[in-house]
Amino acid sequence: MSDLFSRLSRRRFLVSAGISAVGAIALKGCTSPSASTDSPATAVSPIAATDEAALYEAAKKEGRLVVYSVFFTQDILNEIGAAFTAKYPGITFEGTRNTASDLFQKITQEIQAGLKVTDVFGTTDIGQMLELRKQNQLLQFEPADKSAVVEAYRNLDPENYYQPGAYIPLIIAYNSQRIGAADLPKSWKDLTLDKYKDAIATGSGAASGQVGTWALAMQNLYGWDDYFGKFNALNPKLGRSINDVMPVLVSGERALGISTLGQALHRKAKGDPIEVVYPEEGAVVVVGPYGILKNSPHPHAARLFLNFLMGEEYSNLVAKHYEQPLRSNITIPNGKTISEMKTISLKPDEIQKGLPDIVSKWRNKFGA
């Protein structure tokens, strides 16, 4: 037992991110959810997604939109909210960014308590969305301009209970001041080589849907025992969220990290010594869906937000932060888009079936 605690203490780290208000955004904290004080109509009027004027008028009467999202960072979510409220004045945006496991737990608690709090949920664990669908906890809605998003992920759910909200390629990021070009890994398999002992940082496959999806992809390629037995022996530094990786790389505490492409390109653009390896097997693409909760207290505002996600404004905004645009006609400055890189994409049902086992194995192997 003492060995376990020793192992945990040297591997686990937490990076706390401050939350700042932007424009008309009122950010939600991490306190227990409370019931909405709004009193929307119990039935949602059948306004077509293409009738934006009518949808906006109905959303203004609701006056708010509450979003729980795993995607990107809190600052980017703030900016998305600011762009949404600038385009649709009169609607207050409340956005909370956290790990997939934490947000899903909050939503589950709200549903069990009969609280109407959250309107839109975005997750990197598509199995969570499939579970909500199975429990009949999602509203069906097909956004306008859906046909403009990347074709490979356009019909993520043919029945339109959830829509693509983020394409997140996972790659190997590194600090160029800590490791030279000759010593770089070329593949995911290389991250099990002995020479990378005490050099790697990652998030938690038990807490982060993105890291869990990556772990499932590695298990499919190389087998759990073979890959993660070797990986664990290298003493990787474990955070909770995948967002915890980049600060450790920038500081030079670790040389290599399993990171999102967007965060790596963003820090490089800021002048930090961060570079990217596109692994030979392919970047692991986490397709994150957004869905509207059945008990959404602001269902018209939620539908308007999904329309907003399909538009060029959203894709341009996230591309500016080096994140993948949903629309196929928009590029990323100094980075590759999904169509320009080799990728590994797991199917939704494969993730739903495989991720719970990955979470259990991860906890047993790493303790966090």
Image (cartoon, rainbow, N blue to C red):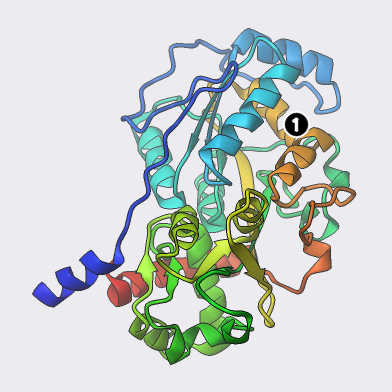
Q: Quadrant of residue 171?
A: bottom right
Task: Establish if 271 lies above or below 142.
Answer: below
- Residue at (29, 74) in percent of width and height: 364
Q: Nearer the viewer, residue 12 or 250?
A: 250
Residue density around tag 1, few if under 14, some if 14–19, many if 20 or more, within 10 Å = many
- Residue at (66, 45) in percent of width and height: 162
Residue most extreme to the left: 2
Secondary structure, mark 1, is helix
Quadrant (top left/top right/bottom left/bottom right) for the N terminus? bottom left
Q: Residue 257: horizontal and vertical position, in percent?
A: 50, 68
Q: Nearer the viewer, residue 330 or 127?
A: 330
Is residue 45 among the parts visible in the rendering?
no
- Residue at (83, 64) in percent of width and height: 339
Is residue 103 among the parts visible in the rendering?
yes
Task: Establish if 158 lies above or below 226.
Answer: above
Check disc 1 and report the residue beneath it. Answer: 308
